[in-house]
Amino acid sequence: MKGCLAVYHREVLILRKKLVKQVASMAVAPLLYVLAFGLGMGRHVEIQGRSYLEFLIPGLVAMSSMTQAFAIASEINIARFYWRIFEEFQAAPIGSMAYVTGEVLAGITRALLSVLVILAIALSFGVVLSYSPAFWLGVVLNSFVFASLAVGMAMLVKSHADQALLTNFIITPMAFLGGTFFPVDQMPSWVQKPLGLLPLTHAAHAVRTAAFEGAPEAFPYVLLASMGVVLFVFALFCVNKAKE
């Protein structure tokens, strides 16, 4: 537990040191999406009986929690390639489980911060949805999935260029195809099936249903939790391999 808290505390200190810049960075993309799509293209559009802006906000929450949780990989890579912090962790009495848990918690923390930024933006535009426990559970599980993936991938890449490729080929396509900007069920059936394999699709559905005061199904939560556990084990395996 002490090792986990030490890893987590280090990441929190880094986040706190550049908190203003991080918050500003987290706000830029969602604000542009709200202005361009929510108030621009979707101003007179209704989806599922809601304005497009109301539909968009939960999608942005799911997308941002994904991207910010996955962004912990960049911090890990900086620590590995430039500061050699990972080598110090290897020498310290910190187990792989503690290291992975600390980094995953740091990724979830970043994701939750980005969600608060989006909700503040939504409030400034007069959008108030239901932020029930089911809403936050969907956010946390989605963050857990992608933070665990980030830790595993960070152990496999050999440079920042490789990390950028992962983001371009995994995170960016998922951000636009996972139900963030449009209802997946309105796509052709042959498109819906592969999109149904994306964790973000289920996260966006669960978060949006909860935000609209609906009763979310258990399946998205169970799926996200299961994927999170599998990817956490994958991250643990990758960290052990990196130590060899």
Image (tube, rainbow, N blue to C red):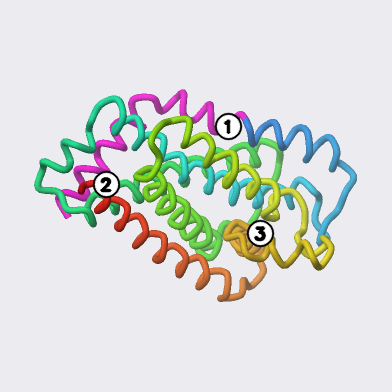
Q: State which tag comes first along the sequence, 1 or 2.
A: 1
Q: Is residue 35 left or right of residue 218?
A: right
Amino acid type at image mark 3: Arg
- Percent across and percent down for residue 214 are 67, 69
User: Does 143 appear above or below 11?
Assistant: below
Task: Give the crowd class for mark 2: few <14, some 14-19, many >=20 residues within 10 Å.
Answer: some
* Residue sitting at x 39%, y 25%: 18
Amino acid type at image mark 2: Ala
Q: State which tag comes first along the sequence, 1 or 3.
A: 1
Q: Is residue 86 left or right of residue 51?
A: left
Q: Which SS type dominates the magenta stretch?
A: helix
Secondary structure of the residue carrying tag 2 is helix
Amino acid type at image mark 1: Ala
User: Does 217 appear above or below 174?
Assistant: below
The residue identified by callout 2 is 242
Badge 2 vs badge 3, beta-carbon distance below 8 Å: no
Q: Which contiguous range is marked in magenta?
A: 1-28
